Image (cartoon, rainbow, N blue to C red):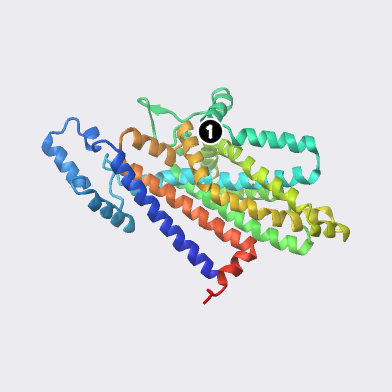
Amino acid sequence: MIRYLVNQTLLSIFKLFIFISIMFFFIQIMMPGDYIDQFSIYCNAECREELRTQLGLNLPIWQRYFQWLRQIATLDLGNSLNGEPIVDILKTVLPATLLVFFIGTIIAFMLGLWLGKRTSWTGSALLSRSVTLIGLTLNTSFPPWLTWLFTYLFIKGAGFAVMGEVGGLRTVSFMGLDNLLWKNIITTPSQIAWYMVVSFAFSALLFYFLKNIIDGLLHKSTPGLIYLLLILVGTYGLWRYFGFEPLAMDIMRLAWIPLASYILLTFGETMIIMQTSMEEIMRSEYISTARAKGLPDSVVLERHAARNALLPVVSRLVISLPYLITGVVIIESSVDWPGMGTSMWNALYWQNMPLVMSTLLLVGIVSLVARLALDIISAYLDPRIRYSSNKAPAR
């Protein structure tokens, strides 16, 4: 198992290196001219040359490449073209993206699992086809269209606050928050969003361990929907316990649109794969044997069928991670949610390429970390992965 984790970690680092290398040369080669011309309209030739020297644009492309690798290794990504440190910008936008991506992925995954199990187990053709049609329709929807529909029906129509624009340009900030609530608060909305993500992760881990203990004592499996509700209630309880519940709820007043859009766009694939996997497993002999022994349907469903059907779903989720992150970026830019998507849109608009490359680097890191975590879960679910990784190489 340890060898498997080390191999996957080294492979993830290698993939990240290939990704950032291709990204660097693609941006440098494809971009016409350089981005100093975009920001130095009122500068003379001497001023422009000084800016190019500060940003290293006067160096050959191979020197700029190694200089950028050195900046990544030292966690010093330099400054954006407006003079703000890029690391500070990424620290601001990352929590907002994780709030949608991390929480939304877990909720969509558990919702898809629950619906996939129930629709395949009940045997109701009408229910299964109806839910499958809804899941397919949402999964294949165009993300900006779905988020626009949510915004039009539930925000503009209901009079909620929306994130706005300044001078026709979208802003990377939490627009629409209650100013009176945040007036005397030192903590920033980005920090509160980070606390929200951490509290959700802690609640998920806590109830996961409690679920395993209770299931072992009662010899039953807790339904996934109840487990999800417990996580949400536990997360809200942590918000209240640590005293930032009003601030968190104010952020959720804006976050639920991109969060709901992301969940509806992604749960359908998990549900359909779970349905297919469950239908195949329920035709297996050991399922017939478990039923012949008189085991309750809930035990057969959760302990025998669902656990074995889970591996293909997790494997597909590992493959789909880059597409899921792309969906989050599109949704953010559609509703001006102040995450990596909106940040990258603004950077592309202003040809702020240092910020664009750093944002893409952050997207790659988030994708690889999430994929490594899912690889660990896959190894936990499938003993064959652990055993094959521990075998000595043939001589």
What x and y, as percent, mark residue 391? Answer: 57, 73
What x and y, as percent, mark residue 282? Answer: 78, 52
- Residue 244 visible in the snapshot: no
What x and y, as percent, mark residue 232? Answer: 63, 47
Q: Quadrant of residue 212?
A: bottom right
Q: In the rendered view, would you say 375 is above or below 176? A: below
Q: In the rendered view, would you say 206 is above or below 333? A: below
Which residue appears at 60% of the width and 59% of the height? 378
Residue 254 lies left or right of residue 24; in this view the side is right
The amino acid marked with disc number 1 is Pro
Residue 255 lies left or right of residue 352; in this view the side is right
Q: Nearer the viewer, residue 18 or 198?
A: 18
Q: Quadrant of the N terminus?
A: bottom right
Q: Nearer the viewer, residue 40 or 21?
A: 21
- Residue 24 visible in the snapshot: yes
Which residue appears at 23% of the width and 36% of the height? 33
Q: Quadrant of residue 293?
A: bottom right
* Tag count: 1
Residue 59 lies left or right of residue 107; in this view the side is left
Q: Nearer the viewer, residue 194 or 274?
A: 274
What x and y, as percent, mark residue 302? Answer: 75, 55
Q: Residue furthest top?
A: 157
For disc 1, the marked residue is: 143
